[in-house]
Amino acid sequence: MRQPSIAIIGAGIAGLALAHQLSAHARVTLFDKSRGLGGRLATRRQGETGFDHGAQYFTVRDARFHAALEPFLEAGHVEAWNAPLMRLNADRTLERLVDRAPRFVGVPTMTALAKAMAQAIEVRLDRQVLSLAGEPGHWFLVTPEERSGPFDWVLSSAPAPQTARLLPLDAADAAAVAEVRMNGCFTLMLQLPGDTQLPFEACQVAVEGDAGDPLPVISWMAANNSKPQRDAAVSLVVHAGSAWSDAHLEDEPDQVRERMLAACRNLFPTIPFDAASGITLHRWRYANVERPLGRPFILDTNRRIGACGDWCIGNRVEAGFLSGHLLGETLTDVMGKLTAKPLSPKLEA
Ligand SMILES: Cc1cc2nc3c(=O)[nH]c(=O)nc-3n(C[C@H](O)[C@H](O)[C@H](O)COP(=O)(O)OP(=O)(O)OC[C@H]3O[C@@H](n4cnc5c(N)ncnc54)[C@H](O)[C@@H]3O)c2cc1C
């Protein structure tokens, strides 16, 4: 019997978990607009140094995520990041926090897990899906370069606003997705002189805003070189706070960079920010999930479309994994039952 053909939009952890789950039962093709795999599990090279500029680490609380990670841990694509977790308090004291769960990272870069997960999957990178054409059970993906298909099913793991633009969701799903809230985040990356002594390796920043900047500017700082198998250069990754990032999302990048640097100097006067080199800013338009969908995925068996991603469940790599995994599990089951069932002739608007 012919295996169903499935297009998945997005090669982040959710799309990859979904592809993994489905590839034993279907012909799966994964499309991503980026040149690399991993989505927000991201690493950028700046000169000789790599910076994990998206997710800093992930935790593993769910047994299904744990089981899926096991082979990648064993193969050395993932390792624990044991640097002490600190917090800079409002009174500028540094406090050591107790981790509630071990922290893991991809090695030698954050994207390593995504690359390993994609090994047996057909992936088309540099393909921004602009729209869907065709009809349920006979979908085509339209990219600037080509029209790909037909596919029996199309599933999107793109962030909620992008999924809403791409998929012909029914009215109830469209309304639910419109309620999802995602925040932006600015990431500053900089290399410090080799002899710099940082007062932390991984540090949450819990310092309130001030008269000049009422919203907290900085929320996180980490020495990328404290993660396993990274370059030795002292490389700092700094995240701006969600509310501050949203308020400045459309500002000039140079202005954002200067304001973040000024805030960094103010928080840690002993770090030689003025001697930093290769300073780069990245803007994440959809970084974190403020208000999730509240159910693990969307699946519309009439339209033969579905959606998953961290935004369905919550704000973490593990949430992205679980959403993709659970959609894959359910769709596998549904496909088995659907083989003889015709598509509904009339779809709601
Ligand atoms: C700055 C930052 C810090 C974070 N820190 C942490 C952390 O410390 N711990 C943690 O657990 N989580 C963290 N997160 C969140 C974590 O990265 C996400 O929860 C997780 O990676 C989401 O995975 P996903 O597959 O759902 O989405 P994504 O990784 O965003 O994947 C979606 C993919 O869809 C692609 N796409 C979108 N539109 C299209 C289109 N039209 N055509 C083709 N492809 C498209 C994108 O290119 C992307 O690759 C952080 C995120 C950011 C940005």
Image: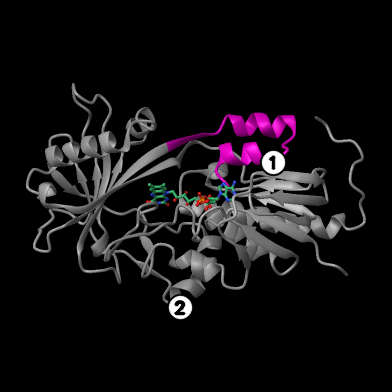
**Residue type for callout 1:** Leu
Q: Quadrant of residue 60?
A: bottom left
Q: Quadrant of residue 284?
A: top left
Place of residue 116 in the rendered image (x, y in percent of width and height, measured from the top left): 51, 71
* Left or right for 38, reference 206: right
Res. 272 in view: yes
* Left or right for 88, reference 167: left
The residue sitting at 32% across, 31% down in the picture is 244
Q: Is residue 303 above or below residue 180?
A: below
How many marks on residues? 2
The residue tagged 2 is 75
Please state, as top left, top right, bottom left or bottom right, where the N terminus lies in the image.
Answer: bottom right
Q: Mark 2: few, some, or many residues within 10 Å (few <14, many ≥20)? A: few
Place of residue 263 in the rendered image (x, y in percent of width and height, measured from the top left): 18, 37
The residue tagged 1 is 167
Range drawn in magenta: 158-183
**Residue type for callout 2:** Ala
Is the residue marked 1 within 8 Å of ligand 1, measured from its CB? no
